[in-house]
Image: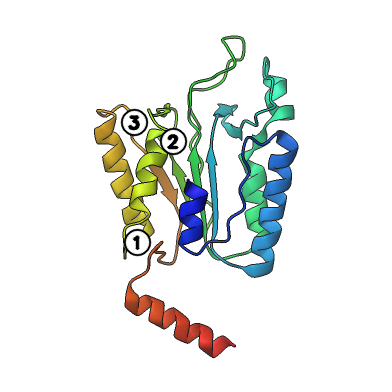
């Protein structure tokens, strides 16, 4: 659903569904190479299980079988790998959306921190969590989690800056969850970004594009 919506908004979308660890690592590597080549606005979205261990955050692929801490290091994707790729790409703006703070599905034997740990966004990056660091997100009652359900609605708001989009998502999710889930962002963006820009900004962007070619 997110991929389809972003494609309609003009993003070049590459989707990985039910990806194993190798597929996830290859996708992140390809993503970084594409950004390095084209220098566009990068948007990385992940929905699934995520966990923290020793203040590091990991995204869990479908083929992970985690029973001890060593398994986390060997079988998941460390978010620092994504940050490293973005740093090497050198593009001006990135958005990372993590709907990944779900209940630990691996049983009581694997002791990990609750939810995801706080991470500072690299320069030019907005890092969005489905819920505040150290908390859990709702899976929702439909095809999407509660967070993604409201994100889908709000990114279609015309002329809204990205910070305002996530503010509205936070308000809607907090109300829908009776305060149990409060989305959170860390941002170091230095430029404005709109999923649907104002008409005058679209015109300006086209004029700048015409001057470049």
Q: Secondary structure at mark 1?
A: loop
Q: Secondary structure at mark 3?
A: loop
Q: Can the viewer see residue 125? A: no
Residue annotated with mark 3: 181
Q: CA distance from mark 3 to mark 2?
A: 15 Å
Q: Earlier in the sequence, mark 1 or mark 2?
A: 2
Q: Can the viewer see residue 19? A: yes
Q: CA distance from mark 1 to mark 2?
A: 24 Å
Left or right side of 129 for 41: right
Rendered residue at 59%/16% (across/down): 106
Residue 213 image offset from top left, x and y in percent: 59, 88
Marks 3 & 2, CB-CB < 8 Å contact: no
Q: Earlier in the sequence, mark 1 or mark 3?
A: 1
Other residues around mark 1 within 10 Å, as few (<14) / some (14–19) / many (≥20) = some
Q: CA distance from mark 1 to mark 3?
A: 23 Å
Left or right side of 177 for 59: right
Residue 48 image offset from top left, x and y in percent: 54, 32
Q: Within the image, what quadrant is residue 35 found in?
A: bottom right
Rendered residue at 37%/38% (across/down): 183
Residue annotated with mark 1: 161
Rendered residue at 39%/29% (across/down): 140
Residue annotated with mark 2: 144
Residue 179 image offset from top left, x and y in percent: 26, 29
């Amino acid at each position: 659903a997110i991929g389809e919506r972003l494609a309609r908004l003009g993003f070049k979308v590459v989707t990985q569904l039910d990806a194993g660890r190798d597929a996830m690592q290859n996708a992140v590597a390809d993503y970084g190479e594409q950004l390095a080549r084209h220098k566009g606005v990068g948007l990385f979205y992940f929905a699934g299980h995520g966990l923290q261990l020793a203040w590091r955050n990991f995204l869990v692929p479908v083929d992970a079988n985690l029973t001890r801490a060593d398994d986390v290091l060997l079988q998941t994707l460390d978010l620092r790998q994504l940050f490293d790729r973005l740093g090497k790409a050198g593009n001006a703006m990135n958005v990372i959306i993590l709907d990944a703070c779900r209940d630990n599905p691996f049983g009581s034997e694997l002791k990990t921190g609750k939810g995801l740990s706080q991470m500072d966004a690299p320069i030019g990056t907005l890092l969005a969590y489905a819920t505040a660091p150290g908390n859990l997100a709702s899976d929702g009652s439909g095809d999407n989690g509660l967070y993604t359900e409201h994100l889908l609605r709000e990114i279609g708001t015309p002329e809204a800056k990205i910070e305002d989009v996530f503010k509205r998502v936070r308000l809607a999710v907090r109300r829908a969850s009776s305060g149990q889930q409060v989305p959170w962002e860390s941002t170091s963006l230095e430029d404005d970004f709109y999923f649907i820009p104002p008409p005058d900004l679209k015109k300006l962007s086209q004029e700048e594009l015409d001057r470049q070619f």
